[in-house]
Amino acid sequence: MTRKAPPACPCLALFILTPTELNHVKRLGLLSVVVVVVVVVVVVVEVIVVVVVKVVVVVVKEVVVVVVVVVVVVVVVVIIITIIIIIQQSFVK
């Protein structure tokens, strides 16, 4: 029995995959890109929230700060849930 030699370059392994497997690889790549984008967006939003909160603390009372923080957190959570639902629907197709 002869064994197939491994491909010289790992990228050549993509040509060995079946179309279904290749589709899964593409989806995983897309999923990782989406996860990175979500993390970057969350970090940027948190930085903006910190800056806004510091400005608001100087200008207004603490009650308004709490309301602003709660609203921003709710908006970020809704955005993340929406992105997760979109990702799940793309895997269902």
Image: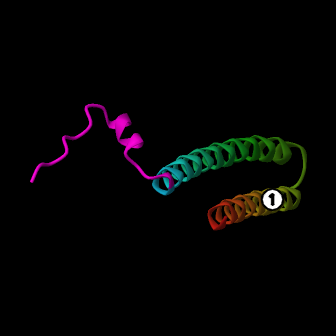
Q: Quadrant of residue 86?
A: bottom right
Q: Percent position (x, y) of residue 53? A: 78, 47
Q: Colour mode?
A: rainbow
Left or right of 35 in this view: 60: right
Quadrant including the C terminus: bottom right
Tell me which amino acid carries mark 1: Val
Residue at position x 37%, y 45% from top? 16
Looking at the image, is 7 positioned above or below residue 18? Answer: above
Based on the picture, tell me whether residue 14 belongs to the magenta stretch: yes
Could you say which is closer to the camera, residue 71 or residue 39?
A: 39
| Residue at the top extreme, as displayed | 8
Left or right of 89 in this view: 15: left
Q: Percent position (x, y) of residue 84? A: 67, 62
Quadrant including the N terminus: bottom left
| Residue at the front extreme, as displayed | 1
Give the residue number, with chain letter if any, for mark 1: 75
| Residue at the left extreme, as displayed | 1
- Provide the residue span drawn in magenta: 1-19
Looking at the image, is 43 positioned above or below residue 90? Answer: above
- Name the main secondary structure of what is drawn in magenta: loop
Could you say which is closer to the camera, residue 24 or residue 36?
A: 24
Left or right of 38 in this view: 69: right
Q: Percent position (x, y) of residue 50? A: 72, 45
Q: Residues within 10 Å of mark 1 (few under 14, many from 20)?
A: few
